[in-house]
Image (cartoon, grey):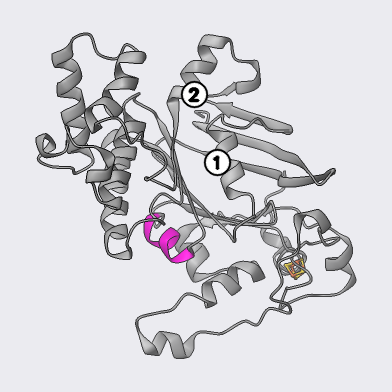
Amino acid sequence: MTSPLLELNHVSRTFMVKKQQIKAVDDVSFSLGTGEVLCLVGESGCGKTTTGKIIAGLLSPSSGKIFFKGNDISTLSKDQHNAYRLGVQMIHQDPYASLNPTQTIFEILATPLRYHKLVKTDKECRDRVLSLLELVDLTPPDDFVEKYPHQLSGGQRQRVSIARSLTVNPSFLVADEAVSMVDVSIRISLLRTLSHLKDELGLSVLFITHDLALAKYFAWDGRIGVMYLGRMVELSPAPFLVDHPQHPYTQVLLSAIPEADPDITRKKQSLQLRSMDVPSLLRLPSGCSFHPRCPRFAGQLCQEQIPSLTSFYDGSAVACHLVMDDRKKDVIKA
Ligand code: SF4
């Protein structure tokens, strides 16, 4: 069996806040194959962006292991580590802050190409910049190449950010809320471009969003992972997760998505949280951290024991005592 492109093994990350240690990411494990999509969803502060930064090499894990192409990244030589950093590129949320306003689009894209010696001549550099702009649907590319970021719309700037991430021929993209700062009307077209790039270049994509409706759209052929207060609470193939959400938190998130069809809306079961307050990472609830809000709260067990993410034969994985209890027979034994 071939090893996955990326594997996270019990990864945690702590930070010191007000002289107290908080776990922004707690015991997260998953793997991703070549060309696969995984969407991480959850409220702000759930650890999805920190997970993305750890994968992109911008933060190191406090514990746990990350394997890229089968190699433990903590044991890589300097050259191998550089290759890993180039192989995993991040698209940031804010296209206004992530592009240098004093450079033209040509300079923004040519700089990494030249720095990493990916082009030999000026002509090759210009041709590559133009083909990158075409790849992200900024056409005709000659209309954009000499412009400055402030002369472009938000959607066009985000396309330049995507083009810049592709300059170094990555195999893995981390897209962190990559479409949330652009108008709703152009989100879908940006997602189509990302999806098309994934297929054409065989890229694996970790797509981070707080919007489960977007995750549903983008990851329909992949998987969705739901995070809550630093932990993965459900990880399943997208259609399965949307049609059969198992964790109460996933059920709450899905019940809050508005549907265009009034018949579907009427049939939708609305789940009420026990509390609207999201607990602070500084004072995490005991046991299952969702228990103060969980509509299916089952008493002492939920309050005292942390449920671990358990995999089932149907490809889903859920961290909930009640689901575990209901589906004992379907558990894949480690
Ligand atoms: Fe709710 Fe208990 Fe399941 Fe946590 S373990 S999600 S509190 S039912």
Q: Earlier in the sequence, mark 2 or mark 1?
A: 1
Q: Which mark is residue 4?
A: none
Residue 84 is situated, as x and y percent measured from the top left of the image, at 50, 22
Q: Are marks 2 and 1 in contact (CB under 8 Å)?
A: no
Which mark is on residue 52?
Answer: 1
Give the residue at x 24% y 37%.
Answer: 148
Main secondary structure of the magenta stretch: helix
Counting from the top left corner in percent of width and height, residue 262 is at: 38, 89
Q: Is residue 144 above or below residue 106?
A: below
Nearer the observer, 294 or 301: 294
| Part of the protein shown in magenta | 212-218
Q: Distance from label 2 to label 1 (Cα)?
A: 13 Å
Image position of 97 with respect to 268: above or below: above
Between 176 and 108, the one nearer to me in the picture = 108
Residue 239 % position (x, y): 44, 63
Of the 4 image quadrants, the one containing the C terminus is: top right
User: Which amino acid, by three-letter code, is at mark 2?
Assistant: Arg
The numbered mark at residue 85 is 2
Estimate how packed mark 1 is, as few (under 14), some (14 to 19) or many (20 or more) residues with alpha carbons within 10 Å.
many
- Residue at 57%, 46% in the rendered image: 49
Give the quadrant of residue 97. Answer: top left
